[in-house]
Image: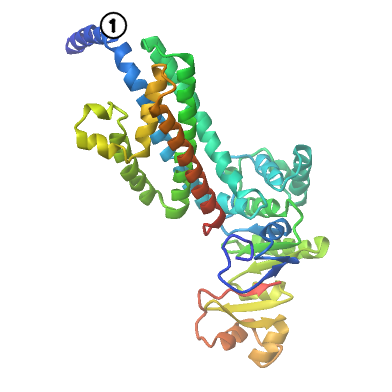
Amino acid sequence: MLLHDTALIYGRYLRQSLRSRFALLFGVLVPGLLLQLGLFGASFAGFTIIIEQDQGVVERMRVTPVSRLALLLGRVLRDATVFVFQAVLLVLASLVMGLRAPVPGVLIGFAFVALLTVSLASLSYALAMKVRTPQEFGPAINAMTMPMMLLSGLMLPMTLGPRWLDVLSHFVPFRYLVDAVRDAYVGSYATAHMLYGVLVVLAFTALAVTVGTRVFRTAGA
Amino acid sequence: MLTTLLAPTGGAATVAGCDLATDPAGVRRACGYVAQSGGVDPQISVREELVTQGRLYRLAKTQAARRAEELARDLGLTELLDRKAGALSGGQRRRLDIAMALTHRPKVLFLDEPTTGLDPGSRADRWDLIRRLRDEHRTTVFLTTHYLDEADALSDRLVVVDKGTVVAEGTPSALKLRYGGSIDASLQDTFLAITGRSAKPADAAPVAV
């Protein structure tokens, strides 16, 4: 009886949400969700390499002449592929639920997800090569991703919050990506947000891949 | 360090004619390395691991496939090619590790304690394999071991490392004569004389070249 009633009431209010607010909400939320997907998924990519370290696979590959950058890029691009695919699913699901966004904007969003995945996964692998145990790795990643997520305005635009929060969030590189993708989803491409977003994501990717490659080249096995 | 896994902290070294500091890529091409932990993914098939390894050494796809078959034949893994690496027995697994390191016919093969934890039968097999590599392929085998009988049986040249420094080197007989007092001295006694210890230390790593 309780189940039945709950389902009934739930259905009623869910339909209401779907009708009225979802289309509106998703314009703000989907860009955030996309980047959140990249943020959390890619940050934990390093776990796989901790397992490989224990098996000696990383060491075995590092004694071959294979390019150090390739050892990193091969892994990172796999992650980017997986997350872009998931992002496509997410956007398709959102379209069904009422998201309306221009095609170029959606494609720009995917590009951001790909670059973000590449950079975060690089840093994640680099960190995993350094710390070596899952016990240290998990908490370290959580300690970094939680503030990044909260301060980036992923969930709601930071401009809605108090002034100090808005200022603080500008020190989180992630913030610029979120703003840029939000602009892309409403079809405004030539904005300052977009320019900053592109610059930040490119710089961040370059930095992260450099750090990652350096670790792969020198890390004690 | 000699396999390029660790950056040298100082000094100079030449491996298979390549300078370690200026030509690490050359060293990597010339060397094979088997770590104690092996280095294969248990979820991947033996064939795939061998082929990938060949590809890492820049063999073309068909060459890598052919080389995988050759290696499997040479090390008695042919029937196991399509099994997952995780489903191999301990001895088979070690043969796979060695096969992986031989992919590019290295001039120098580094083995890190190749017989630690093996039963006597597997250990004898491993010794035969190491001798065969040296005799048939003219491979220089560089191995570390804590077993002095192994060092005695296999090495042409023996280096005793104690607390991070080389304390003696030469043929086993020469070391026995010089430090043990007689060519018939046991390597155990010789070793203790060299290091000046009463009990066998854990970090001694005699090396055979």
Residue A29 on image: x %, y %:
33, 21
Which quadrant of the structure image shows residue A170? top left
Residue B43 in sight in this render: no
Quarter of the C terminus of chain B within the rendering: bottom right
Task: Assign a secondary structure to mark 1.
Answer: helix
Q: In this view, does A102 lie to the left or right of A146?
A: right
Q: How many callouts does the rendering have?
A: 1
Which quadrant of the structure image shows residue A26? top left
Q: In this view, does A1 lie to the left or right of B116?
A: left
Which quadrant of the structure image shows residue A25? top left
Q: In this view, does A173 lie above or below B23?
A: above
- Residue closer to the observer: A14 or B90: A14
Residue A21 on image: x %, y %:
27, 11
- Residue closer to the observer: A83 or B104: A83
Q: Mark 1 points at which residue?
A: A19
Instruction: Please tell me which residue is depicted at 79% across the width and 41% down the height of the picture.
Output: B63
- Judged from this view, the residue extending furthest toward the bottom is B181
Residue A30 on image: x %, y %:
36, 21
Q: In this view, does B146 lie above or below A81?
A: below
Residue B74 in sight in this render: yes
- Judged from this view, the residue extending furthest toward the right is B136
What amino acid is at disc 1? Answer: Arg
- Residue closer to the observer: B14 or B94: B14
Q: Is residue B173 above or below residue A8?
A: below
